[in-house]
Amino acid sequence: MNRTAAQIIESFKPALIQIATPFSTGTGFLCRENGIIITNEHVVRGNKEVVVEGKLHPRQVSKVLFTDPKFDIAFLSADNIDAGIPDVSWGIEKVVQEGDTVLAMGHPFGLKFTSTQGIVSNAVHKINDISYIQHDASLNPGNSGGPLVSAEGEIIGINTFILNNAENMGFSLPIRYVLPALNDYKNHEGETAVRCTSCQNVVFESQGSSGYCPNCGSAIVLPGKLDNYETSGIPKTLEDILVKLGFDVQLARVGPNNWEIDNGSATVSISYYERSGLIIGDVYLCSLPKTAIQPIYTYLLKQNYEIEGLSFSLNGQDIVLSLLIYDKYLRVDTGSRLISELLRQADYFDDILVKEYEAVWKENR
């Protein structure tokens, strides 16, 4: 039975995983049969653990199990897979041709889910002896590691890279490169491994951790032997503040100089802009009512005059409460007090805005 693009997209949403490291964000997808998350190696490079989250997959720390630098493939641990998440369908027998319709799915720029449709322009684009599927489905930073899906709803590739300054020119690694890696890693559940770029053999941690391939002697880096990431400078101070406030720093990291913490029904996003020296904490409270907007505008403007250190703004229909700190004034004690106040006021104001001014709760409540 043929499915529409909308039906295919909806069926993939539960399997899509957002990946965050201290250096970048990306996408992966769950493979229930193997109990892992599949993504690009460059998304998780330099990390032994990353943060993952999906529609039916709660935010948690995931172990980097396998990396293949040559083909840009990585496997992550996938604990507590929800029974409602369907297994992926592989387009193993699919012959990709120019003109085929494809869907690229992922989490660009840290968004929760996006899908773009395009056409295959070159089914066999060779780069360094590796064939890629070239297509014009829009890819953005954060799409890397997500699936490229055929019109039949089968995964035919992994979205891998785009060309800078080239409009809608994306490249996806064909799925035929991924399946051998799955077979090579099979029966080694939980053990970290890396494919040697010289001899192409997979080296498992149990075979030794000398930093050299036991087959050919080339240097290798097992993900399990990497050091844990440690921050410094202003990011270190911000993470010390989060620890003092009782939050899990590792789970809070959602990209370079970005953190996200859940406080009751509210989610607080903290970003550090090194060039300007600004630290901004944002809480999206609720949305404007459809009618009688004047009273809520008046209330928000009045609060901006009265509350100290915080300010209200609008992002579209969303009401945002923000905190701004200059990095040269950041200290653990003062930062803890200011962020605590942001959390307290967010909890206070969202109730007032909804109950007294008919604002609308956010959908993720």
Image: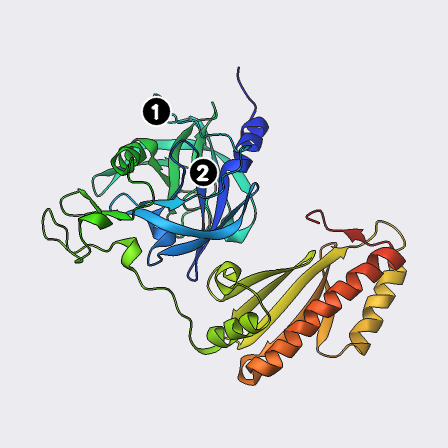
Task: Choose the circle earlier in sequence order: 1 or 2.
Answer: 2
Residue 30 marker: 2
Mark toward the viewer: 1 or 2: 2
Q: Which residue is mark 1?
A: 92
Q: Is residue 8 left or right of residue 192?
A: right
| Residue 305 visible (yes or no) | yes
Q: Position of residue 208 (x, y in %)?
A: 18, 53
SS type, badge 1: loop
Q: Position of residue 197 (x, y in %)?
A: 19, 48
Residue 186 picture quarter: top left
Name the residue: 71% across, 66% down: 321
> Please, what is the three-letter code of the amino acid marked with disc 2?
Leu
SS type, badge 2: strand
> Please, what is the three-letter code of the amino acid marked with disc 1?
Ile
Residue 142 marker: none
Name the one closer to the observer, 119 or 342: 342
Q: Are marks 1 and 2 in contact (CB under 8 Å)?
A: no
Name the residue: 23% across, 50% down: 205
Q: Is residue 112 left or right of residue 226?
A: right
* Residue projecting furthest to the left: 216
Picture layout, residue 353 above or below residue 337: above
